[in-house]
Image: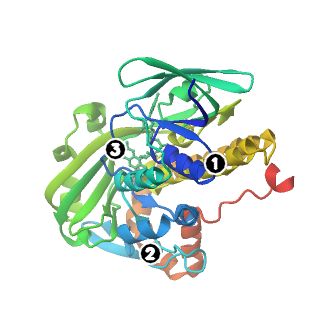
Amino acid sequence: MNRSDVLIIGAGPTGLVLALWLSKLGVRVRIIDKTSAPGTTSRALAVQARTLELYRQLDLADTIVRRGHQVAAANFWVNGKPVAQLPLKRIGEGLTPYAFVEIFPQDEHERLLLERLEDYGVSVERNTALDSFEETGDTLTAHLRLPDGRQEVCQACYLAGCDGARSVVRKALDTDFPGGTYQQIFYVADITASGPALNGELHLDLDQADFLAVFPLAGEGRARLIGTVRDERAERAETLQFADVSSRAIEHLKVHIEDVHWFSTYRVHHRVAEHFRNGRAFLLGDAAHVHSPAGGQGMNTGIGDAINLAWKLAAVLSGGAEPKLLDTYETERIAFARRLVSTTDKVFSFVTAQGRMADLLRMRVAPFLLPKMAGFEASREFLFRTVSQVTLNYRGMPLSQW
Ligand SMILES: Cc1cc2nc3c(=O)[nH]c(=O)nc-3n(C[C@H](O)[C@H](O)[C@H](O)COP(=O)(O)OP(=O)(O)OC[C@H]3O[C@@H](n4cnc5c(N)ncnc54)[C@H](O)[C@@H]3O)c2cc1C
């Protein structure tokens, strides 16, 4: 029977980073994905400084910095005009070698991770799905559905559920996924366009309670629109077209659209699984936590989960640490995920609040305060520390007290 040290379910960014890190540490991994090919859409854009710091150990950081795009400033628009600017170049100076805001689309990111994994002689087994698994004694037995429809029964010491928000692993563990669902529908569009908002910087429209931002992508005139709608259009999310949502960007941010390469809509949940571990099975990434994409934290947090768990699994499998080390994965990462989901929920609810007072804050107070705050090093530093995850630490947690 095929037996691996760690069976990884899902080859999104979380599963790929886990496979890479474990392979680097000499652990025998098997990684499967039910899809026939890697994703081809840009999805998560921001690679946070903490992720780049960790990627240095995999020799990935320099490549991402070279191939990606650094955002020089965030601009805030009211009544069709930019009214405030927050400079982002070197915003985290002194805190990290990656003191900037880095954009590197998820499809390119996944391709890079796959190439590096191949260097370790590991390939993703495609068209292969996890059906079920059970734990008996010191072994985990998994039932896989192979590309030709046959079932394979295999064994592993540990199983990592990196299988996304609709995780089969989480359901098999019967772990609750408490939280809620935003009433708004999110849309994303990768476009080629022209206009003042296509200058390689970030642009946010403060005119309406719904969120609207233009994120720069590498390449002349390339950008990502991210927005929300909650009016009657949200009722027909499945049939929503780019034309239904694009007029605001065209009118408010003066975006002249030339081409739409990808348009998608999706509902966003804010949820954290009740447990990240049950016996020999673990939950990581979107399988364990989901939240608003507005702060660019989702994918980065999944990568952080993978790196936190990888070295612990390697240490236990090699006999260098006792299995109780693995308990610290849930303690450390669930605490961070709960804090993150609560913070992104508060910020997102504030930014998209409706009513006269909220309009006043967004359109009058924020444009006045933002440039003043940008002038203070302390407030710039606070913002960078919060978003980049560089100050995340586990001091005070059990592992630091052993
Ligand atoms: C349209 C869209 C736009 C987004 N935009 C942003 C953004 O701007 N910013 C941001 O931070 N995040 C964004 N996200 C979220 C981001 O893409 C996710 O946070 C990230 O992909 C999570 O990575 P993951 O590896 O944990 O899960 P996923 O990327 O979901 O990967 C899970 C993998 O598991 C596989 N799988 C599932 N079940 C099984 C099974 N039973 N057997 C085998 N394989 C299985 C799936 O095929 C998939 O490849 C967006 C997501 C979408 C869909």
Query: Is the Cβ of the residue at disc 1 closer than 8 Å to that at disc 2?
Result: no
- Tell how many labels: 3
Hey, what amino acid is under mark 1? Ala
- Say whether disc 3 or disc 1 marks the residue closer to the N-terminus: 3
Q: Nearer the viewer, mark 1 or mark 2?
A: 1
Hey, what amino acid is under mark 3? Gly
Give the left or right position of residue 240, taking residue 148 as reference.
Answer: left
Q: Is mark 3 within 8 Å of ligand 1?
A: yes
Disc 3 marks which residue?
39
Give the left or right position of residue 236, taking residue 395 as reference.
Answer: left
- Say whether disc 3 or disc 2 marks the residue closer to the N-terminus: 3
Q: Nearer the viewer, mark 3 or mark 1?
A: 1
Disc 2 marks which residue?
88
Q: Secondary structure at mark 2?
A: loop
Disc 1 marks which residue?
310
Measuring from the top left, give residue 190's x and y in whole percent.
Answer: 25, 54
